[in-house]
């Protein structure tokens, strides 16, 4: 489905969007404290939730949280490690009503007509690090003490964060678990390289579209947070 995209020669746009951080695949991920989650208690900071509370999911309504893994985020003095340097998502970049931070391997569900399956489903999960450069999203240290929090459910779920961002929570699996009880993937997760190619094409298309807009208060093409098609 992405063959036409992946076989293209590297474009000037792709070269300009190279990052100093190596890409990582979708993994355990995590959200930084202060992020609000849609729950049975309303919009709640993720650190205020406890096992037994319910989070609103993209496909399965309210689902109980089985556990919350928490660990401190240790800031690096020098060049940040690719697995620990968070991704900053500005307000409205992905339908989030407030700026937020996620870990680079956090899965984010996005909608784009550039990637559709045989049924026309335009939703796909990409690692947050692949979104760098899209609508102001970038890697950076928060500059203050933070906690990484990972909610766990009985199966893979996508939950609502900050009003509209869709974050994936991956059910923990080990090799024995996978061998004895294989679980069909509910969500399509792109490998890091394919995800990055998709995001570069999304950036390219938005830049072309923005260049056709009339001059606005932010200058020509001030549409950096236009809705995904």
Image (tube, rainbow, N blue to C red):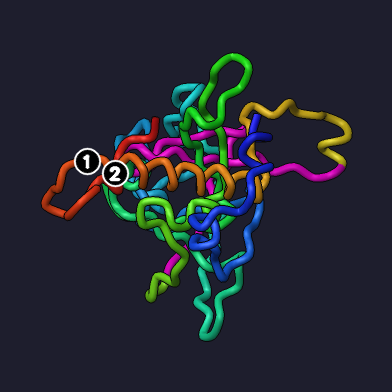
Magenta segment boundaries in residue numbering:
146-175
Residue receiving disc 2: 210
Judging from the image, what secondary structure is the residue with disc 1 in? loop
Asked if one can make out residue 28 in the rendered structure from this viewpoint, the answer is yes
Pointers 2 and 1 in contact (C-beta within 8 Å):
yes
Residue 225's label in the rendered image is none
**Residue at horizontal 20%, vertical 51%?**
220
Label 1, residues with CA under 10 Å away: few <14, some 14-19, many ≥20? few
Is 39 magenta? The answer is: no
158 over 83 or under it: above or below: above
Quadrant containing the C terminus is top left
**Residue at horizontal 63%, vertical 31%?**
188
Residue 17 drawn at (x, y percent) = 50, 60
Residue 213's label in the rendered image is 1
Asked if one can make out residue 149 in the rendered structure from this viewpoint, the answer is no
Judging from the image, what secondary structure is the residue with disc 2 in? helix
110 over 83 or under it: above or below: above
Marks 2 and 1 sit apart, C-alpha to C-alpha, by 5 Å
Residue 200 drawn at (x, y percent) = 51, 49
Residue 162 drawn at (x, y percent) = 33, 43
């Amino acid at each position: 489905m992405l063959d036409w995209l992946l076989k293209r020669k590297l474009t000037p746009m792709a070269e300009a969007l190279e990052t100093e951080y190596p890409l990582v695949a979708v993994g355990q991920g995590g959200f930084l404290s202060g992020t609000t989650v849609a729950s049975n208690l309303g919009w709640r900071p993720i650190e205020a939730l406890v096992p037994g509370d319910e989070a609103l999911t993209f496909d399965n309504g309210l689902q109980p949280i089985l556990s919350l893994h928490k660990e401190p985020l240790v800031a690096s003095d020098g060049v940040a490690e690719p697995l620990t340097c968070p991704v900053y998502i500005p307000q409205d970049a992905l339908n989030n009503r407030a700026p937020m931070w996620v870990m680079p391997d956090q899965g984010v569900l996005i909608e784009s007509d550039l990637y559709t399956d045989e049924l026309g489903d335009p939703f796909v999960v990409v690692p947050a690090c692949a979104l760098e450069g899209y609508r102001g999203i970038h890697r950076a240290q928060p500059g203050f003490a933070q906690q990484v929090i990972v909610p766990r459910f009985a199966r893979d779920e996508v939950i609502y964060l900050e009003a509209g961002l869709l974050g994936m929570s991956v059910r923990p699996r080990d090799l024995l678990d996978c061998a004895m009880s294989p679980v069909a993937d509910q969500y399509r997760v792109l490998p890091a390289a394919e995800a990055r190619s998709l995001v570069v094409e999304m950036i390219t298309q938005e830049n072309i579209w923005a260049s056709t807009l009339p001059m606005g208060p932010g200058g020509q093409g001030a549409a950096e947070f236009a809705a995904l098609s």
